[in-house]
Amino acid sequence: MSIARLRTLFRIGLLALVLPASLALAAPKDAGFELVALGVEGGLDEGNLSSYLIRAKADTRYLALDAGTVLPGIAQALRQGAFADLRPADGLTPQGQVLRNLIAGTFISHAHLDHVGGLLVAATDDAGRKPIYGLAPTLETLSADYFNWQAWPNFADRGPAPALGRYVLTEVVPGQWFDVPGTSLSACAYPLWHDRLTSTMLLVRSGDAYFAYFGDTGPDALSGGQHRLADIWRVLAPLVRRHALKGLLIEASFPDDVPDAQLFGHLTPAWLLRELDALAAATGGTAPLKGLPVLVGHIKPSLVQGRDPRALVKIELEAGNRQGVAFVLPVQGQVLRLPEGAGGAAAERYGASPKSRPLPSPPLRCAKGRGRILRHGSNWGGREERTTVIPANAGIQGRSPDAREAPTSAPRGKGDPARRSK
C-alpha cells in the first residue's frame, strides 16, 4: 500500500474519531411523525371534539384520526402556525386547501357522534372519492345511521340511492396492515372495548417508526374479561424495547373521583396509569417506558362551576407517574413533532444505552394486507407559531404551552382503581 494511501486512511480515521456519534448514527431528518390537534376534548364543545391529523415527516398529506371537529380545528391550527408549507391552490381558502388537498383519508375509531360529527358536516365541500377507514361495525353505523338520506345525505359509495360516492367506505380487518394512498403511511387496527360497542386502536407505521392512536376505551378490569388492552400491550412491547414506538395517544375522559359505574367504557388517570404499568410489565427491563410520549385527550369538560376536569386529570397523572412517561395534554391547534431516530437521546429516554443495538423488527400480529371496500345493502399570511417538539424531558402540558407544572405528589393511595374495581 502506498504512503499516500496510508495517509488518506489515517486522516479518515482521525475524522471518524472527532465526529460526534450523533452525527454518524443519526436517523434521517424526516424520521418520526407530525401530529396536528384539530380537536382534543371528549364532549360538550362541538368545536373541539376528538380529531387529529398525522403524517410522516417526509410526507405532505395527512391521515385524519377521527373527525369529531374538522373545519374549526383546521382554522385554529392555521392560526397557530400549522401547515406552514401550504401553497395557494385552486382558488380555495386555506381551510379548503387543507380539507380537500392535505387530508388523504380518515380513520374512524368508532361511530359515536363526537368522533364523526366534523366529517359529516364537512362532507358537503370535501374532495371526492376519499377513503374512510374503519372496522366493519363502525362503517355499518356510518352507512345505516348517518349516510342514509334521513340523518344526512348519503355521501358514501354505498347505501340508499343515490350514493354520492364522495367517500369510499373502506373496511380494515383487525390484524392486517393496509396502506394509506397518497402517503407513506401504513396502519393496522386492533379492537378495543368501549362499553356497548367496539372501538379501535390504530397502529400507524412509517418506515421503522410507529405511533399508536387509541379510540375511546375503558380498562381491562371493567371489560367483562375481554382483555383487549393486554393484547395490545403485548403487540407494542417489542416496539418499546427497540425504541421504535414514537408515542401513543390515549384517553382519560374523567378525573379519578368519577365512580367506575359511571365511566361507560372510559379511562380515568388511575386506570390509565394502571394500564401503563401493564405495558411496562409486558415490555420488561428497568424503567422501560421512561420518557415515552403519552398524549392524553378526550377529557370531558364540566358544566359545574369551579370544576376543571382537565386540571384534575393533569394533577392526577403527574402524581401517579410511576413509569416516568412524558405526559402531554394537547391543546386544539397544536402541532406536535414526535421523537426522531432509535439511538442517542431517544434510546436514553427509553432507559437503554445509546450504544444498544436495535433488536430485529418484531413479528407484529398484523399480516400484510389492504383495506377492503365495505359493500352496503343494495345498492383539511403570517401566523403565530405553536409547534411542540417533544423532548427527552417532556413534561405534562396544561391549557397552554406556558401553563405551570402540576404537583408531583399526592396523598398515598388516592385514586387507586384497585380499591374501586368491581
Image (cartoon, rainbow, N blue to C red):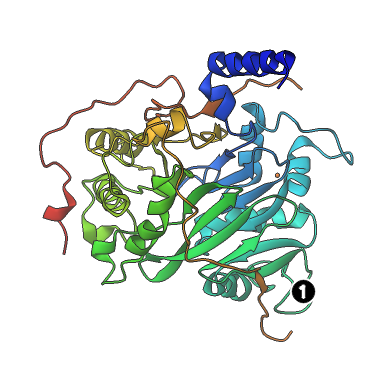
Residue 182 % position (x, y): 75, 52
**Is residue 187 placed above or below 249 in the rendered structure?**
below
311 horizontally vs 96: left or right: left
Q: Is residue 348 visible?
A: yes
Question: On the image, which quarter does residue 412 sit in?
Answer: top left
Q: Nearer the viewer, residue 289 or 50?
A: 289
- The residue positioned 71% from the left and 79% from the top of the image is 160
Residue at 29% x, 67% y is: 223
Residue at 78% in and 62% down? 129
Q: Is residue 310 left or right of residue 90?
A: left
Q: Horizontal and vertical percent for residue 411?
A: 11, 34
Residue extending farthest to the bottom is 378
Please, what is the three-letter code of the amino acid marked with disc 1? Ala
**Left or right, residue 384 beside residue 319:** right
Q: Residue furthest front?
A: 1
Could you tell me residue 294's position as x and y percent? Answer: 40, 41
Q: Quadrant of the N terminus?
A: top right
Residues 65 and 348: in front is: 348
**Residue 279 to residue 414: above or below:** below
* Crowd class of label 1 (few under 14; some 14 to 19; many from 20; radius 10 Å): some
The residue closer to the viewer here, 4 or 77, is 4
Task: Residue 135 in the image: state x and y as whole percent.
Answer: 55, 70
Residue placed under numbered mark 1 in the picture? 163
Residue sitting at 66 percent across and 35 percent down? Answer: 75
